[in-house]
Amino acid sequence: MESGYLQVYTGNGKGKTTAAIGLCVRALGAGLDVYIGQFIKGMRYSEIAALEALSSALGPGRLVVEQYGRGCFIFRDPERADIDAAREGLSRARSALESGGFGLVILDELNVAVKVGVVAEADALALVAARRPGTELVVTGRYASDAMLAAADLVTEMREVKHYYREGVQARDGIER
Ligand code: ATP
Ligand code: MG
């Protein structure tokens, strides 16, 4: 089998989501179709604008990007609507995985969705198990559960050695968001 592995990018250091987007660019260059679903996030991070432009340039079906979040609730408790949005995301992600039509599927921040309780761990595990042979799946987000790590074929842990946010630097457009 040439592809079809589960990759998990986790840890507290910077670079998980951007690594996944880098892989998206590489996969598109090789002719693979790519689906990206972002849990938690509802804000238009700068990569969304670039990916939408790329999607339009490539034409229908080559690059599909969807957001399943209502904005950042990491600083508040999730509400019913956050859970409903995540459930809708699970369903969309499952359709993408079961279609078998994508060579690469990225589920950004799925680990965080499990950690904060908007996605049940069992549902996340069932989702990653639903991918078809030939679909490479990347799951990102800090706090990957032990069961998700066990299910993965590849795990990369981004470890914070230094980060300027400790010096008070806020998230910047184009660099963090
Ligand atoms: P990136 O999206 O840059 O690849 P990531 O996916 O590894 O990073 P996340 O855990 O998703 O990182 O965090 C989103 C962004 O917020 C990261 O760029 C990270 O550097 C930044 N960040 C995390 N914690 C803080 C903080 N306390 N203050 C400012 N920025 C932060
Ligand atoms: Mg991230």
Image (cartoon, grey):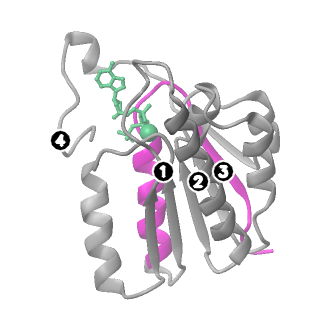
Pointer 1 residue: 68
Pointer 3 residue: 7
Q: Which residues are magenta?
A: 1-28
Q: Residue at x 27, y 37 (%)?
A: 176
Q: Quadrant of the N terminus?
A: bottom right
Residue 15: image location, x then y, percent:
41, 39
- The answer to whether mark 2 and mark 4 are in CB contact below 8 A is no
Query: Callout 4, which amino acid?
Result: Asp
Q: Residue furthest bottom?
A: 59
Q: Name which of mark 1 and mark 4 comes first in the sequence.
A: 1
Q: Quadrant of residue 130?
A: bottom right
Q: How far is mark 2 from mark 3, CA to CA? A: 23 Å
7 displayed left or right of 56:
right
Query: Callout 1, which amino acid?
Result: Tyr
On residue 88, the disc is 2
Q: Nearer the viewer, mark 4 or mark 3?
A: 4
- The answer to whether mark 2 and mark 1 are in CB contact below 8 A is yes
Q: Name which of mark 2 and mark 4 comes first in the sequence.
A: 2
Query: Callout 3, which amino acid?
Result: Gln
